[in-house]
Amino acid sequence: MKNSAILLVSCPDAKGEVASIADFVYRHGGNILHADEHADQESGLFLMRVEFDPKDFDIDLSAVDPTQFNPAQAVHPGSARTGLSEFAKHFDPIAEKFQMTWRLAVSSHRQRMIIFVSKYDHCLVDLLYRHQSGELACDIPLIISNHPDNQPIADFYKIPYAVVSVRKDNKRDSEARIQSLIDQHRPDFLVLARYMQILSNEFVNRYPQRIINIHHGLLPAFIGARPYHRAFERGVKLIGATSHYVTEVLDDGPIIEQDVVRVSHRDTVEDLIRKGRDLEKMVLSRAVRWHIENRILLYGNKTVVF
């Protein structure tokens, strides 16, 4: 695994921001590997991702604890500075001058991901294969499901599998059991790999921008259940899949990634479902990888993926 540091920044757009950040990295011995920025004209917001080699960096980054931060969202320099006090001391003058919110991550940190799944296994299998092959540089301490069907897959990949049944009359108890499992394994983020349950607002609000979902439809069209059937009824010519962060509003969170495939009048509902499943697993894996690599910044209900 490469060893790099990633600085994510958002602030009001102003002259000199890129130069100030680049100069800061240079003055402290860092070597910039990648620099991406976006100025949103409508909101007047500037967003930037700078990845640099910290080998000769003269500020100690060894104490950076990425688990204290939301990997999708920058934090204000005055908050949650565990392990960042030395870096913040030097960077604060720039941050205050440009009213920056910022976050620092290190690529050597392997985030912990808990996967939720129901009966459909295609997204789960794809994530586990990509994880085993090294494409997803994270740890998977647990898979949680409301059905036992995918236990053999978890056993094959040697990952613990917990079954928490969910019924209409026991949802609160089920979420309490799920929360207990999460507390035991302390994940950085959660992935809903076709987990066919609606999470409570209370649960979702514990993990803002830390729950990634795959919707088997091209949002914002056809939200909720059976989107392929509804797309078939409308005679659409393109179907798609959408990966997004989960919010209180069903299927309305910031979109991370989407993809489409063309369909025709000859395709049945079963054809749409088959084609859609191929899209779902690819779209979800991209979103998860970008989250792991600290490539996502949020503003409003949108994302910038660098």
Image (spheres, helix red, strand yellow):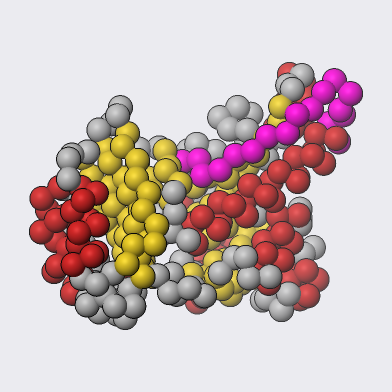
Residue 127 rendering spot, x and y as whole percentages: 67, 61
Q: Which residues are magenta?
A: 254-270
- Please say if 66 is above or below 242: below
- Please say if 234 is above or below 216: above
Which is more toward the observer, 47 or 126?
47
- Residue 262 is covered by the magenta coloring: yes
Which is more toward the observer, 119 or 237?
237
Report whether 180 appears left or right of 241.
left
Report whether 20 appears left or right of 37.
left
Q: Residue at x 46, y 66 (%)?
A: 188
Number of disc labels: 0
Which is more toward the observer, 233 or 168?
233
Report whether 142 appears left or right of 70.
right
Residue 227 rendering spot, x and y as whole percentages: 70, 32
Q: Residue at x 73, y 74 (%)?
A: 157
* Res 241 visible: yes
Q: Residue at x 62, y 65 (%)?
A: 135
